[in-house]
Image (cartoon, coloured by chain):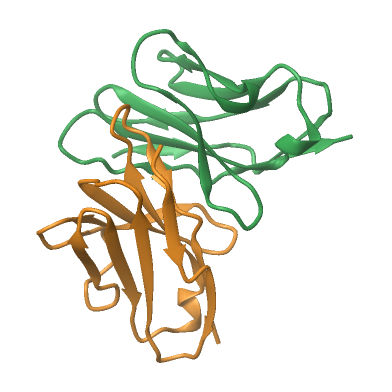
Amino acid sequence: AQSVAQPEDQVNVAEGNPLTVKCTYSVSGNPYLFWYVQYPNRGLQFLLKYITGDNLVKGSYGFEAEFNKSQTSFHLKKPSALVSDSALYFCAVRGDGGATNKLIFGTGTLLAVQP
Amino acid sequence: SAVISQKPSRDICQRGTSLTIQCQVDSQVTMMFWYRQQPGQSLTLIATANQGSEATYESGFVIDKFPISRPNLTFSTLTVSNMSPEDSSIYLCSVEGLIGNEQFFGPGTRLTVL
């Protein structure tokens, strides 16, 4: 069965410092991995994805994520956090096996960036 | 990316009533998805709606409670029937992009059941 784990309910970081939001996954076949962000009272916005190719993928708003197959991880990173990055971040996965397009979401990590 | 709108954006409903949520996309898409996000929780897929066929429901969700229509390639509705306070959630529709497998989400409908 497919699953996603976000081990941290909340991550606190000072503005200007690097940030990491962790995600690990379990999936049959090759993983398709995604990060989404949700601002208060808003829908989900797509940040970035890994399908194939370079393990380091770059996305919107200066975010990047590194796919690590051996550790089954896909951590979200940003070199310098902004207060405006404060939001709820979701990792999601789907496998390439079968016909389903079903996304499995993690429980979310609240990122709080202090000025 | 697709532009997706949902109506209503929020509603407060009485127990036992039903609410129909509309999802409109600015381009034709094959598959549309309906999710539920309960307070403080992650997203859970309710069903996948394909045009011209019955929706496919995930475990724990049934058609009688969450009937779905998909009359054309740009529109879908989700009805939450015989509501109870446990149905208070954000309901989101999404579509898959033409390239790349990511899904794009509507702004959501925040439902409160009293």
Residue occupying the point 36% across, 9% down: A53
Residue drawn at 63 percent across, 27 percent down: A61
Nearest the eye: A73 or B88: B88
Judged left or right of residue B25, residue A98 is left
**Residue A21: x %, y % from top left:** 62, 29
Percent x, y of residue B23 = 36, 61
Instruction: Name the residue rendered at 41%, 84% in the picture.
Output: B83
Residue A3 appears in which quarter of the rendering?
A: top left
Quick check: B20 above or below A99? below
Looking at the image, which is closer to me, A36 or B62?
A36
- Residue B42 at x, y = what percent? 50, 52
Q: Which chain is orange?
A: B
Asked if B94 appears above or below A98 in the picture, the reply is below
Please tell me in which quadrant of the rendered image residue B1 appears.
top left
Instruction: Name the outermost residue toward the right.
Output: A115
| Left or right: A18, with B2 as reference point | right
Q: Residue pushed farthest front?
A: B26
- Closest to the observer, A15 or B105: B105
The colour applied to the residues of chain A in this rendering is green
